[in-house]
Image: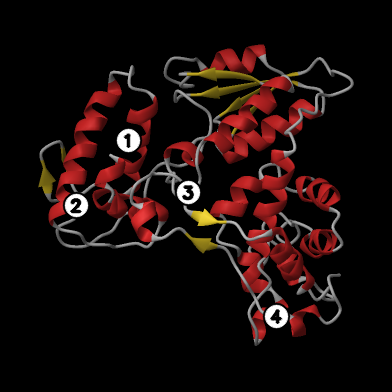
Amino acid sequence: MGKVTGFLEFEREDRDYEPVEQRIRHWREFVLPLPETDYVTQAARCMNCGVPYCQGTGSLTPGTPGCPVNNQIPDWNDLVYTGHWDEAARNLHSTNNFPEVTGRVCPAPCEASCTLNIDENPVSIKSIECAIADRAIAQGLKPEPPAVRTGKKIAIVGSGPAGLACAQQLARAGHDVHVYERWAKAGGLMRYGIPDFKMEKHHIDRRVTQMEAEGVVFHYGADVGVNVRAEKLVDEYDAVVLTGGSEKPRDLPVPGRDLRHPFRDGVPAAAEPACQRRGARRNRSDPRQRQARRRHWWWRHRLRLHRHVYSPGGSVSDQFRNPARPAAA
């Protein structure tokens, strides 16, 4: 555990944000990391509970509280407290392929499940996780190619978080893994849905580079069922894994939902212009993106006039922050 009396001695501290006048001048992340000593004292607050609800039991009982990937949170909190950051990174990566992603965008059900949260402030688990991942990556993200190849070929359809994690695990097990992605780059909604202010996309690029060094082959612009026959994958590979996410937003059945605007019928969901804008930035040679750019600029212009929020999610936050950042345009 951390320090036996740590939760009594130390108050919760968490990462702060850049001042508003600075963050409106760029599109990047604006969360400010804590000093290393503060992460140590925050890890000291971990109580080593007899039943650590923070790490969850989702693999045994789906839907239960705590970490859905069962991170061994008390273990790496103790390792951070004792200064064993490298071992903490190994422990964290044993349950989570991309902790630098979850350390930025996860809603942290682990903190909601922390025993301290009953009548005190919970341990800053998410910030500690992000610090462990970022520190390990800063020291060099080394590929882990398999010692022995199995000779088996596996196709993975979709390169979102599920597809990338699946590809990395199978490649390290010795299989020949090919990932088919319909967009221009890997990442799925991690790249085209999550705003840059929450997670910059070089985190994904760095992991893709690592996976390519481990033998994973990426096929971009490959829309299975459209320009790549599904039968071809079944015939050429020993197994096919379907990890395509859902880009269909949840509908809002309210009056006015079907209002018209210049480029389409109906009010667009926030995720749609967000994906189109990021796709337009990164895939300008694609003819399909010209209309996306027109839609994006219409959407941005309308937001300058009237702003109504129907969800607190990241895509909505991104759309409503765009008009406030003219210096970053």
Which tag is nearer the camera, tag 1 or tag 4? 4
Q: CA distance from mark 3 to mark 4?
A: 29 Å
Mark 3 or mark 1, which is nearer the start of the sequence? 3
Please name the residue that numbered disc 2 is placed on: 303
Amino acid on which disc 1 is placed:
Gln
- Mark number for residue 116? 4
At label 1, counting other C-alpha atoms closer than 10 Å, the crowd grade (few under 14, some 14-19, many 20 or more) is many
Q: Are marks 1 and 4 in contact (CB under 8 Å)?
A: no
As drawn, the residue found furthest toward the bottom would be 119
Answer above or below: position of 175 versus 307. Answer: above
Amino acid on which disc 3 is placed:
Glu
Answer above or below: position of 264 versus 229. Answer: below
Which tag is nearer the camera, tag 3 or tag 2? 3
Please name the residue that numbered disc 1 is placed on: 276
Pick the quarter of the image with the C terminus: top left
Point out residue 184 in the picture as x, y percentages from the top left corner: 45, 23
Q: Is residue 290 left or right of residue 60?
A: left
Displayed quadrant of residue 159: top right
Point out residue 173 in the picture as x, y percentages from the top left corner: 82, 28
Q: CA distance from mark 1 to mark 4?
A: 42 Å
Which tag is nearer the camera, tag 1 or tag 2? 2
Badge 4 marks a residue whose secondary structure is helix
Please name the residue that numbered disc 3 is placed on: 29
Answer above or below: position of 132 versus 191. Answer: below
Displayed quadrant of residue 51: bottom right
The residue located at (75%, 38%) in the rendering is 139
